[in-house]
Image (spheres, rainbow, N blue to C red):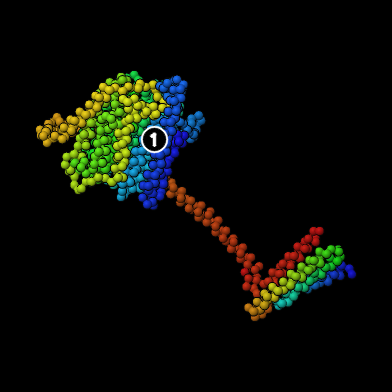
């Protein structure tokens, strides 16, 4: 398969993630969208690694997966606390830093 | 130690600072620190003296081997040279101002004498001044005095000497006025200060004249130039006369002697240290130090008559005569000091350099002994009174140690063989007789007669007859008597350093060495003159003793001064101290101070006040303008403007801070997108 197809898939996934992060109000869905963006990047990395026959891309992908796991741990904890304090996962209500 | 002799004055100087700073917190209120520093100085001075004597002895030994014999002139080739050390303090074109030490026989002798007497006086004071309201302050100043006096001794240039000279004057002023709460004491301090200052003007002019004459302040150079004719005779005469005025002021010579008896208002140990043994001999020391200047300036070698010998001779007699009419034991001793200082100045004036400093040396011991003895009497015998006629008498039974030491001191002062005073006074008289100053030989003999007589009167009034005071007299504690015993031993023994009758001339050998002197005649011991002078002293004692011990039988003689008009007039003349105080205070000071006061009042009102007021008004106007323009407009404007700008900027920026995370994220993505677009467009 050509590199193009991977890249198009990756770009599509990334755009979905960006849309989710910017537009969704539910904190859990925002987190899921972040995961989408990260995985879009992963696809990109692995595709280029295979294309250029350079193992570094795959190593980076492994790192990204690890960090994504940690990020989800922290992110879910934050969402949980938001829910506990505000009785809703709605991110629009989290505006205490308003100037 | 000779090269490091600067440590000797430094120690008491540090002691002064330390006592002043921490003295009050110490268990003995700083006295221990003061005694320790002066004690250390004394030990170092002893070491320096021993090293100097070795240096001289080594040298004369070498000379004997070489077969040259004893050098007549120490400055000549082959003599013992002085130890000099110094550095340039500051320099202005070719003129250098140095700081340094000059250690020769004279300086070593003075170091030893000053530190010894000062140490004993410090020890004595720990008891004598006990419970005093300014105990710590007293010891601090005693230390400062010792340091200044030692600095005066080691100074290698006239400028340092002048500074130290003024420093001892200040210490003397403060210590005379130690109990300044009583008006007479502070008056005495001011009088001492102003009178010696009158003389200091002469000293200062002399130093300046010498500087321009010799081109330097260095004493060794000045002496060398004075000796080899490097300074013109007229300049030498002028500078010697000016310096003599300084000596007259400091060493209590006629006619500026009037401050010294009044200086007895200070504590007795101060009188012993400053006004008997050390500070008042600073003038004599100056004369000895710059002797070539005086010798050439006054043509001392030519015999006849000169100002220095004349002043000394007059002072011997007028001081001794006044000692007869004093009721206060310390004033008797003060006039005696004046008279003995007259001997020293006269000795310098007749060319008896060694005799002068030898008398300075022995006099320090027996006169401080007498003063400390008087202090012991007042401490334990007469309830802090010094009135011989009112509060003393018969004390020999109660105070045996004080009595014996006082009598030893009196006999030494009177010049009785073989005590210290005999040797030194005899040497002065003999030299005066052999250098062509016969008149001064007779003056000295009359002085010896008077000295013996007034000391007999003083001893009689204090220690014999019936006790006239009140309370229980008793012997003083050891802190007071031990210094007396040490000084008494010195008064007996010091004379044998130069006992020419026994062929001993150690004092001359040791302490003349290294000093630059003109060629002087060294008088030989003259048995006839010695016998005459002792006989005269004994006659003086005998007559005075007869008059006082037999005065019950001498009925018609008692009250003689009240009944006989001529005697009464003479007595009143003496009681009023030749009216010199009246002359100074009423005629001279009174004549000057009225016009001066009026003139200064006018200057004060019109000139100084005018200037001050103008400055005040100007300052007020400037301040108002500054407030209106600079403070209100410039400074306040800047501060307010800054605050307002900050506030407005903040108000604008607050809309960005919505608190919504997703809007922040949108901004972030938009920025990244825009930057990526830009990057793509560029490449």
- In the foreground, B205 or B70: B70
- In the foreground, B194 or B130: B130
Instruction: Tell me the residue at 40%/30% (across/down).
Output: B105
Position of B491 relative to B34 (above/below) = above
- In the foreground, A54 or A98: A54
User: Which residue is farthest bottom?
Assistant: A87
Position of B224 relative to B370 (above/below) = above
> How far from the left and from the top, in percent, is residue A55?
83, 64
Does residue B254 appear anywhere in the picture? no
User: Which residue is farthest right?
Assistant: A1
Question: Is B53 on the left-hand or right-hand side of B415?
Answer: right
- Report the residue marked by disc 1: B111
Question: Is B657 on the left-hand or right-hand side of A21?
Answer: left
Write down the quadrant of residue B292 in the picture: top left
Which quadrant holds the C terminus of chain B?
bottom right
- In the foreground, B47 or A45: B47
Does residue B397 appear anywhere in the picture? yes
Instruction: Tell me the residue at 49%/33% (across/down).
Output: B88
Near mark 1 (Cα within 10 A), the count class, few <14, some 14-19 or many ≥20, is: many
> How far from the left and from the top, in percent, is residue A92?
67, 75
Instruction: Tell me the residue at 67%/77% (across/down).
Output: A80
Write down the quadrant of residue B69 in the picture: top left
């Amino acid at each position: 398969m050509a590199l193009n197809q991977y890249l198009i898939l990756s770009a599509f996934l990334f755009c979905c993630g960006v849309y989710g992060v910017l537009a969704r109000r539910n904190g859990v869905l925002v987190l899921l969208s972040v995961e989408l963006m990260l995985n879009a990047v992963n696809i990109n990395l692995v595709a280029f690694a295979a294309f250029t026959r350079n193992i570094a891309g795959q190593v980076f992908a492994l790192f990204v997966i690890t960090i994504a796991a940690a990020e989800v741990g922290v992110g879910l904890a934050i969402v949980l606390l938001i829910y506990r304090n505000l009785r809703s996962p709605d991110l629009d209500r989290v505006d205490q830093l308003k100037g | 130690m000779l090269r490091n002799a600067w440590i000797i004055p430094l120690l008491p100087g540090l002691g002064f600072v330390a006592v002043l700073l921490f003295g009050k917190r110490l268990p003995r209120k700083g006295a221990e620190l003061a005694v320790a520093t002066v004690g250390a100085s004394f030990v170092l001075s002893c070491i320096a003296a021993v090293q100097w004597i070795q240096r001289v002895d080594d040298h004369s030994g070498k000379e004997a081997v070489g077969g040259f014999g004893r050098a007549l002139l120490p400055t000549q080739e082959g003599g013992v040279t002085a130890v000099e050390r110094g550095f340039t303090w500051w320099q202005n074109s070719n003129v250098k101002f140095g700081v340094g030490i000059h250690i020769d026989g004279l300086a070593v002798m003075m170091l030893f004498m000053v530190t010894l007497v000062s140490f004993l006086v410090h020890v004595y004071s720990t008891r004598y001044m006990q419970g005093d309201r300014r105990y710590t302050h007293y010891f601090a100043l005693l230390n400062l005095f010792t340091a200044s006096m030692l600095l005066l001794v080691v100074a290698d240039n006239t400028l340092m000497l002048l500074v130290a000279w003024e420093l001892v004057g200040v210490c003397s002023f403060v210590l005379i006025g130690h109990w300044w709460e009583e008006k007479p004491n502070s008056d005495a301090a001011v009088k001492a200060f102003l009178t010696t200052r009158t003389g200091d003007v002469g000293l200062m002019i002399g130093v300046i004249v010498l500087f321009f004459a010799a081109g330097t302040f260095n004493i060794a150079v000045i002496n060398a130039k004075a000796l080899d004719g490097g300074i013109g005779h007229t300049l030498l005469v002028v500078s010697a006369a000016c310096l003599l005025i300084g000596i007259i002021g400091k060493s209590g010579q006629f006619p500026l002697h009037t401050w010294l008896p009044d200086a007895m208002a200070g504590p007795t140990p101060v009188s012993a240290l400053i006004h008997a043994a050390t500070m008042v001999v600073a003038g004599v020391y100056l004369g000895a130090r710059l002797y070539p200047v005086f010798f050439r300036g006054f043509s001392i070698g030519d015999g006849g008559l000169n100002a220095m010998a004349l002043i000394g001779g007059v002072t011997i007699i007028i001081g001794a005569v006044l000692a007869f009419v004093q009721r206060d034991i310390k004033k008797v001793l003060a006039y005696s000091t004046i008279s003995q200082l007259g001997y020293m100045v006269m000795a310098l004036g007749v060319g008896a350099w060694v005799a002068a400093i030898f008398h300075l040396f022995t006099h320090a011991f027996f006169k401080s002994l007498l003063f400390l003895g008087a202090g012991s009497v007042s401490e334990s015998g007469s309830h802090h009174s010094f009135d011989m006629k009112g509060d003393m008498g018969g004390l020999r039974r109660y105070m045996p140690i004080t009595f014996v030491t006082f009598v030893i001191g009196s006999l030494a002062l009177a010049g009785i063989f073989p005590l210290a005073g005999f040797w030194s006074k005899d040497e002065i008289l003999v030299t005066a007789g052999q250098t062509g100053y016969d008149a001064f030989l007779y003056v000295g003999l009359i002085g010896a007669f008077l000295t013996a007589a007034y000391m007999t009167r003083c001893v009689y009034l204090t220690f014999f007859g019936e006790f006239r005071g009140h309370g229980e007299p008793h012997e003083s504690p050891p802190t007071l008597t031990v210094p007396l015993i040490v000084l008494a031993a010195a008064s007996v023994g010091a004379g044998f350093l130069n006992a020419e009758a026994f062929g001993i001339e150690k004092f001359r050998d040791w302490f003349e060495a290294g000093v630059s002197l003109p060629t002087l005649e060294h008088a030989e011991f003259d048995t006839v003159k010695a016998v005459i002078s002792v006989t005269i002293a004994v006659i003086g004692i005998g007559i005075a003793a007869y008059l006082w011990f037999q005065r019950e039988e001498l009925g018609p003689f008692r009250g003689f001064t009240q009944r006989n008009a001529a005697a009464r007039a003479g007595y009143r003349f003496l009681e009023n101290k030749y009216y010199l105080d009246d002359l100074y205070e009423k005629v001279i000071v009174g004549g000057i101070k009225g016009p001066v006061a009026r003139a200064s009042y006018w200057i004060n009102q019109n000139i100084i006040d005018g200037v001050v007021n103008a400055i005040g008004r100007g300052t007020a106007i400037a301040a108002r303008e500054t407030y209106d323009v600079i403070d209100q407009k410039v400074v306040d404007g800047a501060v307010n403007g800054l605050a307002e700008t900050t506030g407005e900027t903040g108000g604008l920026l607050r809309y960005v801070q919505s608190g919504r995370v997703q809007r922040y994220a949108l901004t972030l993505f938009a920025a990244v997108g825009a930057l990526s677009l830009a990057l793509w467009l560029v490449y």
